Image (cartoon, grey):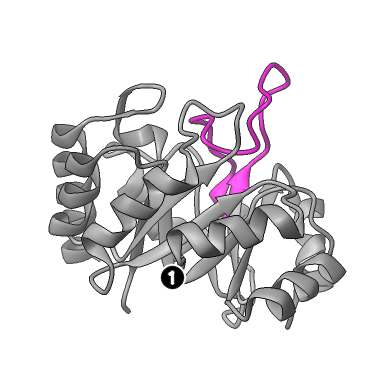
Amino acid sequence: MKLDIKICGLKTPEAVDHAVALGATHIGFIFFSKSPRHIEPADAGRLADRVRGRAKIVSVSVDADNDDLDELMAMIRPDILQLHGRESPDRVLTVKAVTGLPVWKALAISDADDLERIDAYDGIANRFLFDAKRPKNSELPGGNGVSFDWTLLAGLSERVDYMLSGGLTRDNVGEALRIARPTGIDLSSGVESSPGVKDLKMMDEFFAAVRAARVAA
């Protein structure tokens, strides 16, 4: 089975180039001012142009309004919009209609009850991203470096297309793939030397761990 790999929160040419050279299928830019990975749309557009056509460009926003989305569309010309806030199913439908792009909806997972939210977005979101709920002391909806119990996903219908996110590192990605069997993985803090600072060596090690896990599967 093909595995998509998205490196998110990219901010420098070196990190973007390296991620794609290693085999990232998607690169993500975060537009949320409270995040250490926040980037201005114009800067993200220049970085996106470096690898356009070689990886899918994902715009990550949190409860953005239509004006914000219009700016992102114009500046970075994304392939996919990822909504990482409290966007309702109706809002997802509106975003799809206004932009004409596929929309991924992030859902925060802590226990089995959280998976019940999938039904409301079924047939509306083009893909899900399952992330851990943020710690109480964090204002970030993602990128907190924490994971959730992946066994919760074991009984999920195979028709639910999702990326797994939250606390993935070179040390646990093999276990995550074995237990959750996602169609894609998304990481940010797991390849950072400090919040918002991507480490090229850590990227190397992460992709090596993914390859090893795939061979062993």
Q: Where is residue 81 shown, x and y percent of the image?
A: 57, 64
- Answer whether residue 119 is visible to the viewer in this image: yes
Horizontally, is 5 left or right of 209 in the view?
A: right
What x and y, as percent, mark residue 178? 38, 59
Determine if residue 176 is in view: no
Give how far across and how far down residue 18 sits, in percent.
16, 48
Q: Position of residue 9 (x, y in %)?
A: 42, 41
Residue at 48% in and 47% down: 41
Q: Is residue 25 above or below residue 170?
A: below
What is the quadrant of the C terminus in the image? bottom left
Question: Element type at marker 1?
Answer: loop
Q: Is residue 215 left or right of residue 29?
A: left
Based on the displayed image, in which of its 4 quarters is residue 83 positioned?
bottom right
In the displayed structure, does residue 74 sit left or right of residue 117? left
Dominant secondary structure (helix, strand or loop) of the stretch shown in magenta: loop
User: Callout 1: few (<14), some (14-19), or many (20+) C-alpha neighbours within 10 Å?
Assistant: some
Quarter of the image that includes the N terminus: bottom left
Examine the rendered structure and indicate whether residue 133 appears above or below residue 123: above
Going by the numbered disc 1, the residue's amino acid type is Thr
Query: Magenta span has 118?
Result: no
- Which residue, given by chain and number where applicable, does mark 1 sit on? 183
- Please say if 197 is above or below 73: above
- What span is colored magenta in the figure? 131-151
* Number of disc labels: 1
Q: 158 or 67, which is in the foreground?
A: 67
Q: Is residue 71 above or below residue 187?
A: below
